[in-house]
Image: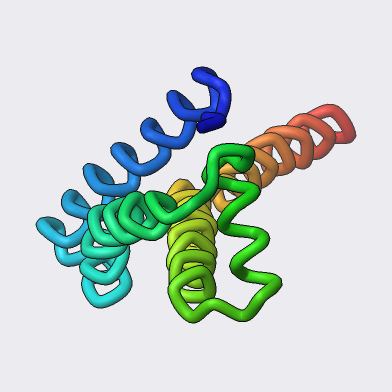
Amino acid sequence: METLPGWFLIIFLMFLFLTFIISAICYARAVQTTISVIALILSLAIPLINLVFSAQRSGEMNGYEYLIAQLQDGNWWAILIIVGYVYLIVWWVLFINKQLIRIQFYQRVIKLYKKLSDKTVTYWKNRSS
């Protein structure tokens, strides 16, 4: 049986582990609770479903190739697994977007610009009088 490269599995498991931890933290802090609970459940369920699903594969395909082949055949389990992974990716995009908004980078820049502008106006007023 073929397997995926070790580096891919490490990145994949880190993705799932971070998704589980951060979605649990979001749920505990009551931030995006509904989608965080779904992400929490999917980060545990999808790999288990995928493990059971990929146990049926033949020896010449790795797990990813088997999943794609079954998806092309219209297998409902393959569709469920792909939808679960897409949901986790969308959850990450929403989480990162919310964090960037919370930082409020643009408001800080505007405040600094106003300070600089006020100092410049004051300087030119004092200089002209």
Is residue 71 depicted above or below 56 in this figure?
below
Residue 77 appears at what percent x and percent y? 44, 73
68 horizontally vs 121: left or right: left
Q: Residue at x 69, y 35 (%)?
A: 116
> 86 or 67: which is nearer to us?
67
Q: Residue furthest right?
A: 128
> 5 or 15: which is nearer to us?
5
- Evaluate whether residue 98 shows in this view: no
Image label count: 0
12 horizontally vs 114: left or right: left
- Evaluate whether residue 62 shows in this view: yes
Q: Residue at x 27, y 46 (%)?
A: 22
98 horizontally vs 120: left or right: left
Is residue 37 depicted above or below 129 in this figure?
below
Residue 51 appears at what percent x and percent y? 34, 50
Q: Residue at x 51, y 32 (%)?
A: 1
> 37 or 128: which is nearer to us?
37
Q: Quadrant of the C terminus?
A: top right
Residue 31: name its quadrant. bottom left
Q: Residue at x 50, y 19 (%)?
A: 6
Residue 37 appears at what percent x and percent y? 21, 68
Q: Residue furthest left?
A: 28
